[in-house]
Amino acid sequence: MQIYLGPAGLGGAKDAVENLQHFAKLGLEACEVAFTYSVYLKKPDAIRIGKEAKKLGIKLSIHAPYYINLSSDDKSKITASKKRILDSCERANYLWAEYVVFHPGYYGKQSKEETYEIIKQGILDLQKTIKEKKWKVALAPETTGKINVFGSVDEILKLAKETKCSFCIDFAHLYARQQGKVDYSQLLDKFKKFKYLHCHFSGINYTSKGERNHLNMDSHPPFEPLAKEILKRNLNVTIISESPNTWQDSLKQKKIFEGLGYKF
């Protein structure tokens, strides 16, 4: 059993190594590089940062840009989305970051079933390129927080089963998508055949339409019941904090796990 905790966001290329060293001193062992608006790292910087992360024992992952829609009815937008994901995968390869997290798409005018098939084909196309490039990365479509956005638990699980991609479980998103109803035991039962889980956690503000914005983890959903369930199941997990207080909340998570008897 291994638990990796750390923040979303590494900062710019200039500050990245210093930030990694700071996280390591705090006892954090993960960090998700956030390409929120663009794939901003150049190859030499990605290699340099990846080497430092490896030296410090910090497990890196990437969140691809938000401007992704693999199910758009505009083919040029699908092409642009694939490029953003592949650019993220290329940097991930240089960073030794295994998982590339992204929001897959929107239902739009298509049915949920049609949207699924379009996104599935997009992921298969991406995986073909990843294999050709020999990049050691895994695509991780994420569970999403808005009701009209593709990314329910069952949709993400089906993608993982049928394309052999990985996934990212965002517990805050699911709390918002399911209107404040998340049973951690039932949820984790759905993922019990997987040996490793890549996850996001934060507090969340939501409306009847789902996710509105991320909050610090002192709000809802509660974290301790999730921590207990993870320990009970002896899960190997990475939990990335996406709260406004990113690394500070990672330390709160660490303290909760330690209070339950886990030794980092």
Image: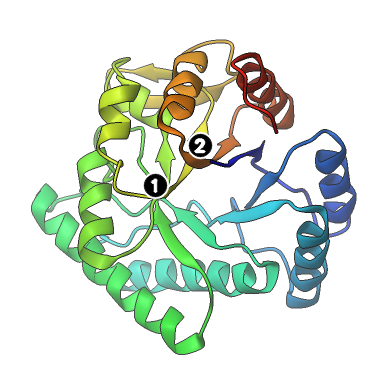
For the point 28% across and 73% down, which residue is it? 124
Can residue 73 be seen in the rendering of this structure?
Answer: no
Image quarter for residue 221?
top left
The crowding category of the residue bearing disc 2, from other C-alpha atoms within 10 Å (few below 14, some 14 to 19, many at least 20), is many
Q: Is residue 58 above or below residue 263?
A: below
> Residue 112, how many percent across, how many down?
13, 48
Vertical arrangement, residue 201 with respect to residue 103, above or below: above
The amino acid type, in three-letter code, at marker 2 is His
Three-letter amino acid code at the position of disc 1? Glu
Whole-number angstrom distance, CA of label 2 to CA of label 1: 9 Å
Q: Secondary structure at mark 2?
A: strand
| In the image, farthest residue toward the bottom | 132
Q: Which residue is mark 1?
A: 142
Query: Residue beneath label 2, please?
Result: 200
Image x and y of residue 172, in percent: 44, 27
As drawn, the label of residue 27 is none
Query: Outermost residue toward the top?
Result: 219
As rendered, which of 66 and 137 lies closer to the eye?
137
Residue contact between numbered discs 2 and 1, judged by CB atoms under 8 Å: yes
* Residue 192 location (% of width, % of height): 30, 41
Q: Is residue 67 left or right of residue 176?
A: right
Q: Between 167 and 114, which is closer to the camera in this rendering? A: 167
